[in-house]
Structures are given as C-alpha cells and as structure tokens.
Image (cartoon, grey):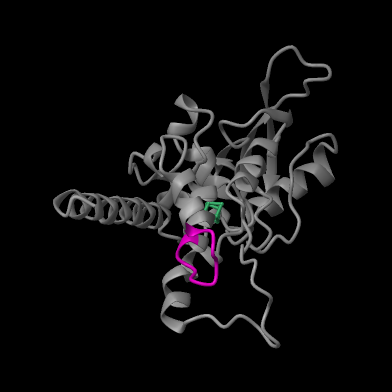
Amino acid sequence: MKCKFIIYRFDPAKDTAPHFDEYEVEAEPSDKILDCLNKIRWEHDPTLAYRFSCAHGICGSDALMINGRVELACQKLVMDFKTANNFVIEPLPFFNVVKDLVVDLKPFFNKHRRIKPYLINPDAPPDKERLQDRQIQEFIEPALRCILCASCTASCPINRVNENYAGPAALLRAFRYVFDPRDTATDERIESLNSEDGAWGCRTMWWCTDVCPKGIPVTKCIGQIKRLIKEKDKLKNALGEYMEDKNV
Ligand code: SF4
C-alpha cells in the first residue's frame, strides 16, 4: 500500500525555521514505522536525520511523535494506526532539536544523574553478592524495565513549567533505590526528593504511564515515593510530640 509521510525537518545550521517534507512510501501493513523511515532515507532522501539502534524496543533511541503521540518507531506498525495511509512524524516534544527528528537528550540524562542512579552502600561487599529480598525485587521490578527512552519525560506537561523538575524517568529510577534495602542513602535520597523539583512536582496526570512503551506504572511508582516521604514525616512528627509530652 502507498503511505504518505509528512516529516518535520529542521537543520539549525542552515534553516531559519522548521518545515515539513512529504514522502510517499510503498509499505506493508506489518512494516514498522522505523522500516518506513529507513526506506525514506535509503530510497528518497539520505539527508533525513533520526536515531535508532536495536530496532527491537530495547535501546529506546527511536522515540518520536507519530500522529501527535509519543511512540517508539520500532514498536509501532503501519497497521496499528487508524489513518494507516497518512503519518505525521515529529521529534520528541520539549527537547531542543539537533536535526530533523534528533533531539538533544543532555537535559534528560543530567536529571537522571542528579538522582544518583546507582547503589550507595559504603559497607565492604560480601564475598559473593548483596542478596535482594524476593518480595522487594518484585515491588521494584517495574522500574528495572525502564529503557531510558525519554518518552515519559517528553510527554510530561510539568517539564514545561518547571525546568528543574526531575521528571518521571529520573523519579522512577529514584523509586528503584529508595525502596532497595541494600542502599544506605535512603534518608538523603528522600530529603532531595521532598520538593517541587522532586516527587511533589508530579501532579498525577498519568501521561507518563500512558506513553511508556514498556507498560511501566510510572505515576504509581512516583506515588510510592510521595507516600514514603509522608510516612517518614508522620514518624518524625509523632516522635516530636512524644518528646514534647515527655519534656525531653
Ligand atoms: S519509564 Fe517508560 S517512557 Fe519513561 S524512560 Fe523509562 S521506558 Fe521510557
């Protein structure tokens, strides 16, 4: 079948403003959108820029907007769309465009680094490994599926009003560590998440959960961080009242 692709084009090195180019592609209903982009680049226009690597939903590098919604180009087939003959392809929203469909993800990875996405434990490691409790592993497992594709952060409207907001992907990674008993920096992590730039920036709009290509309940995980912060506060307040009563 013939499909029309209307694609966002912008080269900051020579264009003064973005524009859209149209391409006609012969595609099978079972072709991935990424296959169509490859066809356009290989057969029509080698200057078209976009990112991809594994092409199987693992590397997360080909997230972009397809017909107004953030998707992975390698996970969506032509037949997944009702308007199967017409596609509008745009770069991820919110991030600056490097060229065409390629965006600058530095701010995304900087926020990710900010939450210290690694196990903190100054104790000497045991002979074999730091064993994980099975139930806790199941609890934090959704966060381990994250492929850092940035779809959630690009879709989150809070990023547009607070550029310091950590964003859903970074908070999801923080969730993975605050609930891991092998990590000893829980208090320090909770402290830094207890702000509008952290967990309280989330307004529970569910857009992150809606677009996540890995089906991760991102909003719920952020909710668990909020609950933990509240419970810690409750404990602190109860302790304060007790000390007051006892005149300690
Ligand atoms: S949580 Fe989902 S949408 Fe967000 S970066 Fe991870 S895989 Fe992508």
State whether residue 151 appears in this view.
yes
Q: Main secondary structure of the magenta part?
A: loop
Q: Report x, y in % for residue 9.
A: 71, 27
* Residue 124 shown in magenta: no
Describe residue 196's horizontal placement relative to residue 42 as left or right: left
- 95 or 170, nearer to the observer: 170
Q: Report x, y in % for residue 225.
A: 39, 54
**In the orientation shown, which residue stands out farthest toward the left?**
245
Instruction: Name the residue located 47 percent from the left edge and 66 percent from the top edge.
Output: 142
Describe residue 235's horizontal placement relative to residue 3 as left or right: left
Instruction: Name the residue located 56 percent from the left edge and 60 percent from the top edge.
Output: 146
- 65 or 124, nearer to the observer: 124
Q: Report x, y in % for residue 42.
A: 83, 46
Q: Report x, y in % for residue 70.
A: 52, 43
- Which region of the structure is painted magenta? 178-186
In which image quadrant can residue 224 be found?
bottom left
In which image quadrant can residue 117 be found?
bottom right
- 25 or 135, nearer to the observer: 135
State whether residue 67 appears in this view.
no
Q: In the figure, 80 relative to 198: above or below? A: below
**In the orientation shown, which residue stands out farthest toward the top?**
16
Describe residue 236's horizontal placement relative to residue 66 as left or right: left
Describe residue 121's horizontal placement relative to residue 40 as left or right: left
Instruction: Name the residue located 31 percent from the left edge and 54 percent from the top edge.
Output: 227
Instruction: Name the residue located 76 percent from the left edge and 43 percent from the top edge.
Output: 40
